[in-house]
Amino acid sequence: MITDFSDGTLFDPKKIAGLLRTSSEEVAMTVGLGKDALQRRTRIESDKTQRRLRELVEVLNKVQPRFGSQLMAYAWYRSEPLAGFDGRTAMQLVQDGKAQQVLEYIDAVDAGVFA
């Protein structure tokens, strides 16, 4: 649930890291940000940081029902190559600013297009 990842107004990297049982530095890396992006409040509040964190949360929430847990969804996000993207993972696509393509891919799979 999206509220699990926020402090009420912003996506909270510490909450995200805690739920995914990882570090804030790894969360930063998985969304294509430098580790310092999640250390200073002003950087955490920036539009780019919040957009990238939101994209991660959107992807995980969209696939979580398929895998049964946020941890398994995160494992998929990091390691499963997506068909039609030259073996790239959801993480690699999000790092490159292509989260919308990942979300569209998930919708297509759910609709049976890539089944």
Image (cartoon, grey):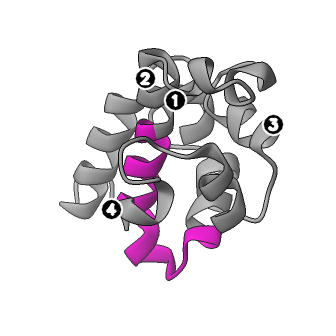
> CA–CA distance between discs 1 and 4?
22 Å
Judge by depth and name the residue closer to the eye, 87 or 54.
54
Label 2 or label 4, whichever lies nearer to me, is 2
Q: Dot 2 corresponds to which residue?
A: 98
Looking at numbered disc 4 in the image, what kind of residue is underneath it?
A: Ala
Q: Which of marks 3 and 2 is nearer the N terminus?
A: 3
Asked whether 32 or 93 is in front, the reply is 32
Res 44 quadrant in image: top right
The residue at 38%/62% (across/down) is: 3
Q: Which is nearer the eye, 15 or 68?
A: 15
Name the residue type under label 3. Answer: Glu
Q: Magenta residues?
A: 54-72
Q: Please give the residue where the numbered disc 4 appears in the rendered image.
A: 115
Q: Distance between the residues labelled 3 and 4?
A: 35 Å
Q: Which residue is drawn at 42% across and 41% down?
A: 10
Name the quarter where the C terminus is drawn: bottom left
Determine the CA span between mark 3 and mark 2.
21 Å
Using a 10 Å C-alpha cutoff, classify the residue at mark 3 as few (fewer than 14 neighbours), some (14 to 19) or many (20 or more). Answer: some
Where's residue 75, x and y in %?
Answer: 68, 60
Q: In this view, does 6 lie above or below 101?
A: below
Q: Residue furthest bottom?
A: 68
- Residue to which mark 1 is pinned: 94
Q: Nearer the viewer, mark 3 or mark 2?
A: 3
In the picture, the disc for residue 25 is 3
Instruction: Mark 1 or mark 3: name the one nearer the start of the chain.
Output: 3
- Label 1 sits on a secondary structure element that is helix
Q: Is residue 7 magenta?
A: no
* Gap between marks 1 and 2 measured at Cα: 5 Å
Crowd rating for badge 2 (residues with CA inside 10 Å; few <14, some 14–19, many 20+)? some
- Name of the residue lying farthest toward the left: 111
The three-letter amino acid code for the residue at tag 2 is Lys
